[in-house]
Image (cartoon, coloured by chain):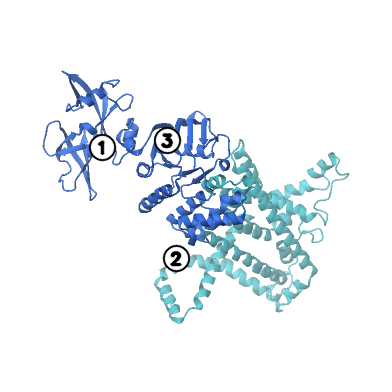
Amino acid sequence: MLPSYIAHQDRGLPTMTIVTGEASQVRQPRTTRLDLLRQTWSSRADYLYVLPAIVVMLVVIAYPIYYTVELSLFKTPPGLQLKDKSFIGLNNYTTILMSNVFWRVTLNTVIWTLASTIIAFVLGFALALALHREFFGRGMLRAIFIIPWVISAVAASYIWKWIYHSDFGIIGVVLVQLGLVDRPPNFIDSVSTVLASLIVVNIWREFPFAMIMMMAGLQTVPEQLLRAAQVDGASAWQRFWHVTFPHLRGVSTVTVLLLAVANFNSFIIPWIMTGGGPSNASHIWITHIYELAFGRQRWGVASAYSVLLFVILMTLGYFYVRALSQGDQREPGA
Amino acid sequence: MAHVILKDLVKTYGPVYAVRDVSLTVNDGEFVALVGPSGCGKTTTLNLVAGLIPITSGDITIGERVVNDLDPKDRDIAMVFQNYALYPNKTVYNNVAFPLQMRRMSSSMIDQKVRDAARMLDISHLLERRPRELSGGQQQRVALGRALVRDPAVFLMDEPLSNLDAKLRVQMRSEIKRFHQDFDATIIYVTHDQLEAVTMADKMAVMNGGYLQQYDTPAQVFANPVNLFVASFVGSPAMSLIPLEVTTAGGRTILTSAEKWTIELSDQNARKVQGATSRKVVLGARHSAIRLHKSQVAGSVPAKVYTVEPTGDVTFVQVFLSGTVVNISLPPTFDVEPDEQIWLAFDQNRMHLFDGETELALQA
């Protein structure tokens, strides 16, 4: 789930930086623009080299984006008879914003994204700190903690579906055996607990990513700074607060943003475990869009949803790039 | 300020000795350099004094207190690190104030102390900047300021100059020396650069293999190295060391090389080699104690020029003698070519003699 997303982000982002670069050039006087043209012409060979990549990106990214925006303005008939589509302007958007389901799904998405991101990050960071110090069996624990992240999300979802099962689930059995409840609880068949149950699975799957990122970050904290703080009289907590944490600000920002974007785009876990049910209680944006498009063939509405999601994600992407480039600026002085 | 006493200090890592039976006294206001090659135990010794690593055995006394079991913050020390270890996210002001803030001093007290230290070190105009906006020299002064505000009993400095370029290093060297003079600071300074130790310190402690080899003033260490290691480590270019064999015949004491050339020793030097445990001795001579002749003179030995390195004021010549390289300094006017046959004469009064087996200096 995560890797494919990161790859997508990486492809999408450089374009954004180039756009901002050009935008600032436009405000320059005319002579500069001529210089820019001359510069462009003199380095035309460079453009030739990146041309294949640009063509591929136009075909597999730009065109789908354009087509999605176009479709969002049309009413599409069921089935794949897209030639019968009719232009309805922004009607799809009004339909979406007026519907109760939209707000329900949006709230679910916000809860899902925030809870998963924050808890997975805090848990991963805490484990990274715990595993940073050397002790017997550390390597083994690291390996064990990474397992959730490396096994297939589909397989994990099926396993968790059984773990949660209201009749045969291991959690329910254990709870009954311990005498804590009379009957196995309904984790994913109840409107009130389904979202939280899925979030637990998602956190279980994602915390290793945060852990690895923060472990890598921790290894770059200069030993001398920690010693200096120790001599200066800082306690273990103060050393963390004044030295370690500020040093990890860049990697923390990037980790949180990557997690947030990945969670926003989550599909596999909710789709396989509940398919958005019961009664939309575990639908988030992506599963809802998928159901609209491929379940109910409402291409126009699904496209409009996608456009809204795209705008939100690009905003997050902007902050991601900014966090990354701030890290670059910090580097030389550090 | 206070004195520091190390007594039979030992640090082991498993079976490996990092520091072995080191005893030395740093007097109040003294600048002592711990010097030696990588892995000699000098930084470990400093960290033991700082309390950053626990000692295996022995005692460390700072002022009147044995500090063996005290935390670094309770030892009344301040430390200056390689790269200065300034907190990159804090302003200069907060860097200097940090040790005081950790001691929960009132903010008005802190403000006064920080500004006083900043004035003394001439960094008042930098207080709002961040470390990355400072030059190497300014960073060093901030690091000194952070140490100074604490008013510690002793300053510990861990190779503070080793990451600077050559020019800045010379400049910072004099700044630290000035700092020592101005504040009468007791300083223990770790360096692998013997030149830094010789130029800055009141006393130098030469270490090797965890052992303290010699502890004396730089002049004494330079003039009377106690063993072959100290002789080869201190001084630039290094002292030339030539392994020879001693023979006595008819009241004359003679050193013979593998190539059979000989040097007759003066009476005083002859008395020195009487103490040798075997016939093997090592002749040591600094570059200025060897005279180069274009033709054979009495008491000179044949050698061949290897390289000639003019430095402006003085020309250093490397010469092959009995398979070892001998360094000689010459006035720049002296004309000598590589591969030229020359003769060397050793100054008997400035000659060092070492036991070939024990490697200790031979005394009369």
Residue B305 image offset from top left, x and y in percent? 18, 40
Residue receiving disc 2: A49
Q: Which chain is cyan?
A: A
Q: Of the residues shown, which amino acid type is indicated by label 1?
A: Arg
Residue A52 image offset from top left, x and y in percent? 49, 66
- Pick the front one: B288 or A280: B288
Count neighbours of disc 2 (C-alpha within 10 A) and say few if under 14, some if 14 to 19, many if 20 or more: few
Q: Quadrant of residue B249?
A: top left
Residue receiving disc 1: B286
> Which of the two marks, 1 or 3, is nearer to us in this view?
1
How many tags in the picture? 3
Callout 3: helix, strand or loop? loop
Residue receiving disc 3: B40
CA distance for labels 2 and 1: 63 Å
**A240 relative to B217, above or below:** below
Q: Of the residues shown, which amino acid type is indicated by label 3?
A: Cys
The answer to whether residue B319 is seen in the rendering is: yes
Which subunit holds the residue at mark 1?
B
**Which residue is drawn at the image coordinates 60% and 57% (left, top)?**
B108
Q: Of the residues shown, which amino acid type is indicated by label 2?
A: Tyr
Callout 2: helix, strand or loop? helix
> Farthest residue toward the bottom?
A30
Of the chain colours in the picture, the one used for chain B is blue
**A83 relative to A124, above or below:** below
Residue A279 in the figure: left or right of residue B1:
right
Residue B228 in the figure: left or right of residue A282:
left
